[in-house]
Amino acid sequence: MPNPTQSDLHVNVPLTNVSLSWKQDSDAFICDKIFPKVPVKHQSNIYWKMGKAAWRRTDVKKRAPGTESPGVGWTATTDSYFAEVYAVHSDVDDQSRANTDSNWNLDKEATEFVTNQLLLKRDMDWNARFFTTGVWTTEYAGTTDFTKWSSAGSDPIGDVARWQLDFRKLTGFKPNKLVLGAEVMLHLLQHADILDRIKWTQKGIITEDLIASLFNVEQLFVSYATSTDVDDIPDADVQDAAATYDFISDSKAALMCYAPKAAAMKTPSAGYTFTWNGYLGGNSEGLRIKRFRMDPIASDRVEGEMTYDMKVVAADLGVFASDVVV
């Protein structure tokens, strides 16, 4: 059954102002903000991974007259990607279109709904791939490795500073991005140490930019996107009553990493997202929306496709902290 139904589309004029759209703000999704996107022409290929040790040692020697200088080089390995194609559609049937009031733009609504589905899927995949244990070289756990930031006597600023020092020792790079679960951010907004640090700033209000500054990172992101796993039920009221919602990301975790603004040769990154823009005119996001006729069901179909593969490129360039708060 199409959703919304005809009865949803033919709205009495006095009720037009109470129509609700539960579309998530695109800012809630974080996948495209953390690691560089690498648009590729082919669905699968190989890419280079430079060795790290060669860049952290020196063979420079004093040169005697008439002798050659020492020869140096670095090692490199390859890895591969395969950009899977993900798809979903929404049908706009002729009867609904003919019975639609002017305040509904069915093609636009279907496009937004399909796009939201794809973005939600991609963010869920990003979290399963990167925002979890067993992925990064360095991991910390609350209580075991540090006092949970929701507990009295905890020191989040000092903890992050120590993690950054260890990060620099291991990689030679300064971490530049920090991703926080929603509950971690909630506790930081109320943490006594942070409130004390910012009390002399304008209005004494904690913002994400202020916390990024306190943690000495260029960018801070909080994952607020939510999802539900309720089955599709034709009756919207029944479906909503059965649904439970949760954050896509582990709300009690944090990820600190280094990732450049754009992918480049000899420029390390904790991760990449390969997007197959060579697939039938897809954009740099690997996203394509098309509309075509489905005569057997007397409908126009709005179909979205998205292609990507998410790869950990340098596990040393990520630090994952679990159970950061209670």
Image: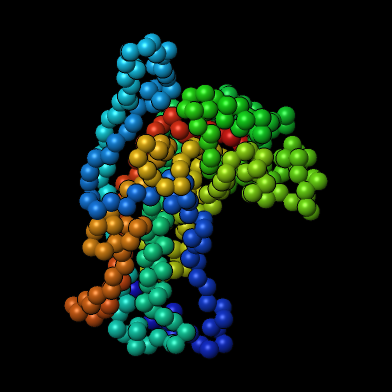
Viewer-nearest residue: 86 or 295: 86
The residue closer to the viewer here, 214 or 31, is 214
Q: Is residue 294 above or below residue 134?
A: below
Does 175 sit above or below residue 74?
A: below
Quadrant of res 115: bottom left
Q: Can you see residue 147?
A: yes
Q: Where is residue 33 drawn, in percent x and y? A: 47, 50
Residue projecting furthest to the left: 296
- In which quadrant of the rendered view does residue 94 lie? bottom left
Question: Residue at 47% across / 68% down in the picture?
Answer: 237
Q: Position of residue 7 (x, y in %)?
A: 42, 81
Can residue 241 be seen at all in this image of the molecule? no
> x and y percent of residue 224 in the render?
54, 52
Residue lying at the far top of the rendered structure: 64
Total numbered labels? 0
Q: In the image, 229: left or right of 303?
A: right
What x and y, as percent, mark residue 324? 59, 35
Left or right for 70, reference 137: left
Give whichever of 305, 99 is nearer the camera: 305
Residue appearing at x 32%, y 13% in the figure: 67
Q: Residue at x 37, y 36 (%)?
A: 266
* Furthest residue in direction right, as rendered: 200
Judging depth in this view, the residue of 40 and 65 nearest the camera is 65
> In which quadrant is the C terminus drawn?
top right
* Left or right for 100, reference 323: left
Colour mapping used in the image: rainbow
Taking the spot 39% from the left edge, 13% from the top edge, the residue there is: 63
Image quadrant holding the N terminus, namely bottom left
